[in-house]
């Protein structure tokens, strides 16, 4: 299987991130594999990263390994989903108070 490193899943990212806390609590490796996907937290996240839900559905449909290979291929051509971001939006509501 292709190795996929996400800073959140490997211990990086803010400890107060509600999405990170949720994933750990539900013991899923990535949000699209959760039964509740897309949940309210993810829907809020799409206000910043609008392709998140459709990208997660694609991952669910083709599986993690194939999805990672697609992402690696896109990255070779300079396209990375994380670069699609709505400027000026903040992460309010995603961090635990």
Image (cartoon, helix red, strand yellow):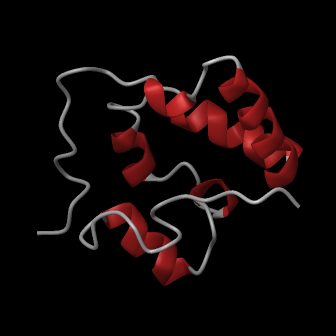
How many numbered badges does the structure rendering display?
0
Residue at (34, 42) in percent of width and height:
44
Image coords of residue 30 (percent x, y)? 61, 62
Image coords of residue 33 (percent x, y)? 69, 61
Residue at (70, 40) in percent of width and height:
57
Quadrant of image for the N terminus: bottom right
Residue 15 vs 70, above or below: the answer is below
Quarter of the image for residue 66 reads top right
Q: As drawn, which residue projects farthest toward the front? A: 76
Q: Is residue 28 left or right of residue 83?
A: right
Front residue of 1 and 38: 1
Q: As drawn, which residue projects farthest toward the left? A: 97
Residue 51 vs 29, above or below: the answer is above
Quarter of the image for residue 88 reads top left
Residue at (80, 33) in percent of width and height:
70
Residue 24 vs 86, above or below: the answer is below
Image coords of residue 25 (percent x, y)? 47, 82
Residue at (37, 42) in percent of width and height:
45
Q: Is residue 69 left or right of residue 86?
A: right
Image coords of residue 12 (percent x, y)? 39, 67
Front residue of 2 and 93: 2
Q: Is residue 95 left or right of residue 19?
A: left
Q: Is residue 81 left or right of residue 8?
A: right
Quarter of the image for residue 22 reads bottom left
Quadrant of image for the C terminus: bottom left
């Amino acid at each position: 299987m292709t190795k996929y490193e996400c800073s959140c899943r490997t211990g990086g990212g803010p400890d107060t991130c509600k999405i990170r806390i949720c994933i750990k609590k539900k013991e899923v490796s990535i949000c699209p594999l959760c039964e509740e996907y897309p949940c309210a937290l993810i829907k809020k996240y799409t206000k910043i990263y609008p392709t998140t839900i459709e990208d997660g559905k694609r991952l669910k449909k083709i599986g993690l390994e194939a999805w990672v290979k697609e992402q690696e291929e896109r990255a070779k051509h300079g396209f990375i989903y994380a670069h699609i971001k709505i400027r000026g939006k903040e992460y309010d509501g995603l961090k635990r108070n």
